[in-house]
Structures are given as structure tokens and as C-alpha cells.
Image: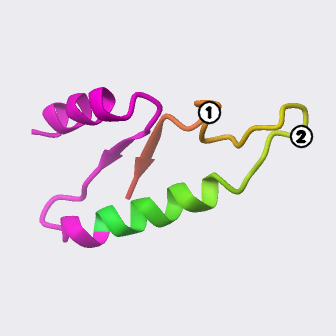
Amino acid sequence: MDEMNAEMQTKEAPNAPTVAHAPGGDTEATEQLTADIVKALKSVYDPEIPADIYELGLIYRVEI
């Protein structure tokens, strides 16, 4: 099931990191936490390139 979710996410947002959900965890809370983490990552800029590390594709996976 996680592979299917990762594949769907890649089609919808090819630059988005994959997300690993904890078994038995609250997926809604995990998705909100992931969104908050991505928002924070988007505020970190590469000093040599005027782009954030998330948009550069330097984040491959968010695992909670």
C-alpha cells in the first residue's frame, strides 16, 4: 500500500518526498506533521542558489 501511495504522490507532485506512515498511527496527524515539516524545509535556502532545499530536490523522504 505504501508503494502505491508513493507512486501516486510522485505523479501528483514529482518533487515531493515520499512519506512513511507509522503502522497503526494517525495518518491525518502524520500528513499534517509532514506538511508542517515541508513548510519548514521550504524556508531553508541554498546559499549558492536562490532556491530552497525542498524545491531543489535535496529531500528524498520524510519518515515519521
- Residue 34 placement, left or right of 46: left
SS label for mark 1: loop
Q: Quadrant of residue 2?
A: top left
Q: Quadrant of residue 22?
A: bottom left
- Residue 64 placement, left or right of 37: left
Quadrant of the drawing holding the N terminus: top left
**Range of residues picked out in magenta:** 1-29
Residue under label 1? 58
Quadrant of the drawing holding the C terminus: bottom left
- Residue 49 placement, left or right of 15: right
Q: Position of residue 17 (x, y in %)?
A: 43, 39
Would you call the spot at circle 1 few (<14 residues within 10 Å), some (14-19), or many (20 or more)? few
The Cα–Cα distance between marks 2 and 1, rounded to whole angstroms, is 14 Å
Q: Residue at x 28, y 27 (%)?
A: 11
* Residue closest to the eye, 21 or 40: 40
* Residue closest to the eye, 12 or 45: 12
Q: Residue at x 44, y 48 (%)?
A: 62
Residue under label 2? 47
Q: Position of residue 46 (x, y in %)?
A: 81, 39
Q: Residue at x 56, y 38 (%)?
A: 59
**What amino acid is found at the position of numbered circle 2 in the picture?**
Pro
